[in-house]
Image: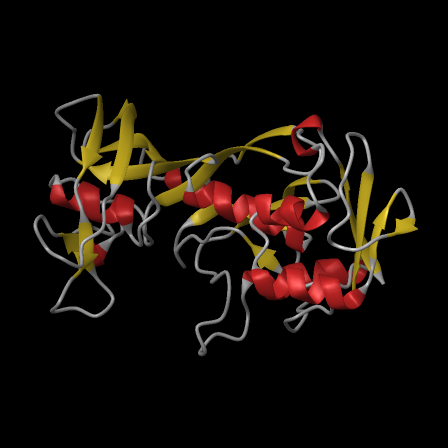
């Protein structure tokens, strides 16, 4: 049996263990599973969910899991790893998880890595990037870390930044695009700016021009929201589609895939509080034609 440990901070003094788990956004089904397992310990002594914790108590929860996808022996570039988190560089043209038609996905490679390290746990990614997008993807190694990081993604506490090559020269070197995005009713896999549409969701992208070239520009984007195809839709709407993005009007003259790279993430490990700041080097295909 595996376990996850948490040192109780002053903020949680007097909380029940159940209340601590809820504050970490652990769902009711998981809390009930923990209750039934009877693998709850404070300072190595067995307790139940109604136990009131004290500052500096060590909460330990035992759990038994299995790797939940087929391991495939392919190398992965690990950018960061600790007891709770693993951050990797996803190559372009690789799905994070299967859509039913793809046998090889990033989760399969992570599963093989876990297997090689004797880690027998579910594969839990906390955010996704598109098939053609390269760069940073964050995984949580346990349910407690996963629950809180998921919440931090939803509340935009985790900083995610991208590099993109876009057509032409933008009028402003720095700006915020605040335009709602909804599905394109005419193309199933496409999205569009939909002002006034009921199905559209608030979408906010902050961008800054890093460098300008003859026909295109390298920009840095920070997402305040995480809608599907958000950067691609917003820049296309401004008449500056991403290079290689034929779905949204881009050209493959300089690069044969969507020129989007997840290059920076900044977050705090929710278990030990350590700040993690990771940058992923610009890929070689971004450098062609410059």
Residue 115 in the image: above or below residue 202: below
Q: Nearer the viewer, residue 194 or 109?
A: 194
Residue ID at (75%, 43%): 83
As drawn, which residue projects farthest toward the bottom? 101
- Asked if residue 18 lies left or right of residue 94, the reply is right
Describe the colour scheme in one phrase: secondary structure
Tell me where residue 32 appears, x and y as whole percent. 66, 65
As drawn, which residue projects farthest toward the top? 173
User: Which quadrant, please, contains the N terminus?
Assistant: bottom right
- Asked if residue 238 lies left or right of residue 218, the reply is left
Tell me where residue 244 appears, x and y as whole percent. 27, 51
Residue ID at (27%, 44%): 231
In which quarter of the view is residue 34 placed?
bottom right
Q: Nearer the viewer, residue 133 or 8?
A: 8
- Asked if residue 248 lies left or right of residue 83, the reply is left
In which quarter of the view is residue 172 placed?
top left
Tell me where residue 126 appears, x and y as whole percent. 52, 51
Residue ID at (77%, 63%): 120
User: Which quadrant, please, contains the C terminus?
Assistant: top left
Q: Nearer the viewer, residue 121 or 112?
A: 121
As drawn, which residue projects farthest toward the left? 196
Question: How many marks do you count on the picture?
Answer: 0
């Amino acid at each position: 049996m595996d376990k996850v440990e948490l040192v109780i901070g002053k903020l949680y003094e007097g909380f029940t263990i159940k209340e601590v788990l809820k504050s970490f956004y652990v769902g009711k089904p998981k809390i009930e599973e923990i209750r039934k397992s009877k693998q709850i310990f404070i300072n190595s002594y067995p307790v139940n969910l109604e136990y009131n914790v004290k500052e500096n108590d060590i909460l330990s929860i035992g759990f038994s899991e299995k790797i939940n996808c087929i391991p495939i022996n392919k190398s992965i570039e690990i950018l960061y790893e600790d007891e709770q988190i693993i951050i990797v560089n996803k190559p372009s043209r690789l799905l994070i998880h299967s859509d039913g038609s793809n046998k090889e996905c990033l989760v399969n490679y992570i599963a093989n890595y876990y297997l090689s390290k004797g880690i027998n746990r579910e594969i839990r990614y906390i955010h996704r990037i598109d098939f053609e997008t390269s760069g940073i993807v964050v995984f949580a190694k346990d349910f407690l870390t996963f629950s809180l990081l998921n919440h931090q993604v939803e509340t935009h506490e985790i900083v995610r930044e991208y590099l993109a090559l876009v057509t032409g020269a933008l009028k402003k070197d720095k700006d915020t695009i605040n335009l709602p995005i909804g599905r394109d009713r005419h193309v199933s896999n496409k999205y569009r700016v939909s002002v006034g549409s009921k199905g559209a969701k608030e979408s906010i992208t902050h961008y800054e021009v890093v460098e300008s070239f003859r026909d295109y520009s390298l920009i840095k984007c920070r997402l305040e929201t995480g809608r599907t195809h958000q950067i691609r839709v917003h820049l296309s709407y401004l008449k500056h589609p991403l290079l290689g993005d034929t779905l949204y009007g881009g050209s493959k003259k300089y690069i044969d895939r969507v020129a989007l790279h997840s290059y920076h993430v900044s977050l705090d490990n929710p278990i030990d509080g350590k700040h993690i700041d990771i940058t992923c080097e610009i890929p070689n295909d971004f450098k062609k034609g410059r």
